[in-house]
Image (cartoon, rainbow, N blue to C red):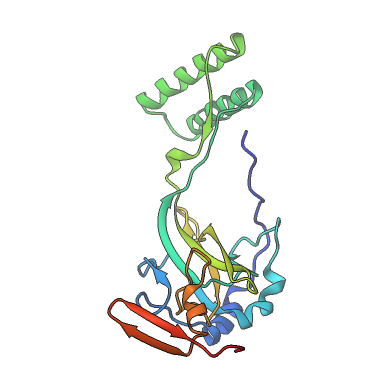
Amino acid sequence: MARKPAKRTDEAPLDALRTVLNTQLIQLSPGINQISNPPPADQRLEYYFIPMQFMKQYQAFHRPGKPLKNLKLINYDKPAISLSFFYKHKYSIERTVTHSDVEQHIRNYRDELLNRSLMQQLSIAQLKELQRTDEILRTVRQHPDAYQACFSNYAHNYYYWYCTYRYFDDLAAMTTTTSSEHLLKHTERPGHEVHQRLNIIFIDPDYISEAVPHDHKLIDRELKTFPIQLKQGTTTLYLRESGT
């Protein structure tokens, strides 16, 4: 089966963090800052834009390979100079499966139906499903090659907001890289409490309001080194004294 992501078990103190975050956060707006398609107000989605000068205060929560269950540092050590967001159905599909995994999955599915029958009377459709599952399990045991199989979580409709951010991978050379991460959201299951989760997005306040060309030629910054600018028609002559 597909390799499962690292299991989140430990949790961060969200109430204490919110107190600090609310003193540090800044608001970003399209047209003023380099941000596009920010998520609309949603009680299930909680995120904060935090200037990079506060980033080291969150180092204890930066745990590669062992993420926290209720907190995600979207771009620790990679403060964003531009941001965009999009909504996406997140799913995976694993086509390389083993016979034992397939048989185990069918057996677990059948056992769920059997356990349900002990608690309540199954409907006609559920009884037919139990019978069908028994037949499939019998066939798989007797004829391992009877079916082609794959695993996927597509039908569970996991939709997430994603954050795409650009950051300087070499500030001296002014070169950038783009990465994407999905945001955690509050979840609630029937009969269970709401599980709150928050996201922190670090930004570079010096550049989040200034466009950085994607072609890395940075022509605008080069031209700023020419203090004399003579514009005529569609062409401008840029001059600077020799030796400056």
Foreground pick, 197 / 219: 219
Give the residue furthest to the front: 242
The quarter of the picture where residue 27 lies is: bottom left
Residue 202, position as x, y percentages in the image? 56, 74
How many numbered marks, from 0 up?
Answer: 0
Q: In the rendered image of this protein, does residue 199 appear above or below residue 15?
A: above
In the image, taking residue 125 as reference, residue 10 lies left or right, namely: right
Query: Residue at left 72%, top 72%?
Result: 60
Q: In the rendered image of this protein, does residue 103 appear above or below residue 241?
A: above
Residue 13, position as x, y percentages in the image? 63, 73
Foreground pick, 171 / 2: 171
Which quadrant is the C terminus positioned in? bottom right
Residue 95, position as x, y percentages in the image? 56, 28
Which quadrant is the N terminus positioned in? top right
Foreground pick, 218 / 161: 218
Examine the rendering and report whether any part of residue 104 can be seen. yes
Query: Residue at left 56%, top 83%?
Result: 19
Examine the rendering and report whether any part of residue 74 can be seen. no
Residue 232, position as x, y percentages in the image? 30, 83
The quarter of the picture where residue 51 lies is: bottom right
Give the residue furthest to the left: 233
Q: In the rendered image of this protein, does residue 55 appear above or below residue 131?
A: below
